[in-house]
Image (tube, rainbow, N blue to C red):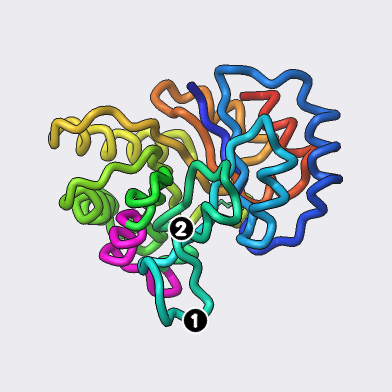
């Protein structure tokens, strides 16, 4: 099974238009590709109703279950907005940069687990860590912290911060190295295999090269998922 995720972030999407453009350019839904759309909270309900061939994911969740947490949305409330909600992103670098440390990422995942929503765990280093040769220890710290309490993400996305939103995806060598670090970690802990994804400036231009990597199970797409036509082209090349 391959996984293709659209992370719309905080962009305003005309959902009907997006759907029509996607369907005009994506000839046939295939059983071998799971397409997951992650809209903002407000659009969850409409996407759940309209995108019957896709799975639906949220972009974030509160680390609390209920109470005085202004502006936050609980896992239970996510399910209230979308009965078809299957996934939720945790640990995205944009959320980490606003304070989501490894502990919060874990607490959010616990909330998801309690509500049977599957976490999509994002990990990835910044340019400074990469250039200092500290990527492996950094990724292992993120992984160790996540798995130490018995949590299990459904998918793991390697998302190097230095590639996200830049228009320049990581090269094959860097992706292969990072996937190896993650696979070796899972193996050393005797954990069962988890599909590994890549995210960071994936586009119609580079999708074939990226997906040619043998142990890559899919991609998480930001900017290039905002246009239904472009995202359909990526899906076609999967
Ligand atoms: P991008 O975003 O495709 O725009 O680089 C990816 C992501 O942040 O998940």
Image location (x, y in percent) of residue 142: 27, 55
* Residue 77: percent from left, percent from top: 51, 61
- Between 121 and 158, the one lying in front of the other is 121
Of mark 2 and mark 1, the one earlier in the sequence is 1
Where disc 2 sits, the SS reads: helix
Please tell me whether the stretch drawn in magenta is mainly helix, strand or loop: helix
Q: Position of residue 95 (x, y in %)?
A: 46, 66
Front-most of 229 and 162?
229
Label of residue 70 in the image: 1
Magenta-tinted stretch = 97-110
How crowded is the residue under tag 2: few (<14 C-alpha within 10 Å), some, or many (20+)? some
Q: Is residue 78 visible?
A: yes
Cα gap from disc 2 to disc 1, whole angstroms: 16 Å
Depth check: give the residue in front, 20 or 94: 20
Name above or below for residue 204 compared with residue 6: above
Q: Which disc number belongs to residue 76?
A: 2
Magenta stretch encompasses residue 106: yes
Say whether residue 207 is left or right of residue 180.
right
132 falls in the magenta region:
no
- Mark 1 Cβ and ligand 1 under 8 Å apart: no
Which quarter of the figure is the C terminus placed in? top right
Local SS, label 1: loop
Look at discs 2 and 1 and give the one toward the viewer: 2
Residue at (44%, 79%) from the top-left corner?
Answer: 69
């Amino acid at each position: 099974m391959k996984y293709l995720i659209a992370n719309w972030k905080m962009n305003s999407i005309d959902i009907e238009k997006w759907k029509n453009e996607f369907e005009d350019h994506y000839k046939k839904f295939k059983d071998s590709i799971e397409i997951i759309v992650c809209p903002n909270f407000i659009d969850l309900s409409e996407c759940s109703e309209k995108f019957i061939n896709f799975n639906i994911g949220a972009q974030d969740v509160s680390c609390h279950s209920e109470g005085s947490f202004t502006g936050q949305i609980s896992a239970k409330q996510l399910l209230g907005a979308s009965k078809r909600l299957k996934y939720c992103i945790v640990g995205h670098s944009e959320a980490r940069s606003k304070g989501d440390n490894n502990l919060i990422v874990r607490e959010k995942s616990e909330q998801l687990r309690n509500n049977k929503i599957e976490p999509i765990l994002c990990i990835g280093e910044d340019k400074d860590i990469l250039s200092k040769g500290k990527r492996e220890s950094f990724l292992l710290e993120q992984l160790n912290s996540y798995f130490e309490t018995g949590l299990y993400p459904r998918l793991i996305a390697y998302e190097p911060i230095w590639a996200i939103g830049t228009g320049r995806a990581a090269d094959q060598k860097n992706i292969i190295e990072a996937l190896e670090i993650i696979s070796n970690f899972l193996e050393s802990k005797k954990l069962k295999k988890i599909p590994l994804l890549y995210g960071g400036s994936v586009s119609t231009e580079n999708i074939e090269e990226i997906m040619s990597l043998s142990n890559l199970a899919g991609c998480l797409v930001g900017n290039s998922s905002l246009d239904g036509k472009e995202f359909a082209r990526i899906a076609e090349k999967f």
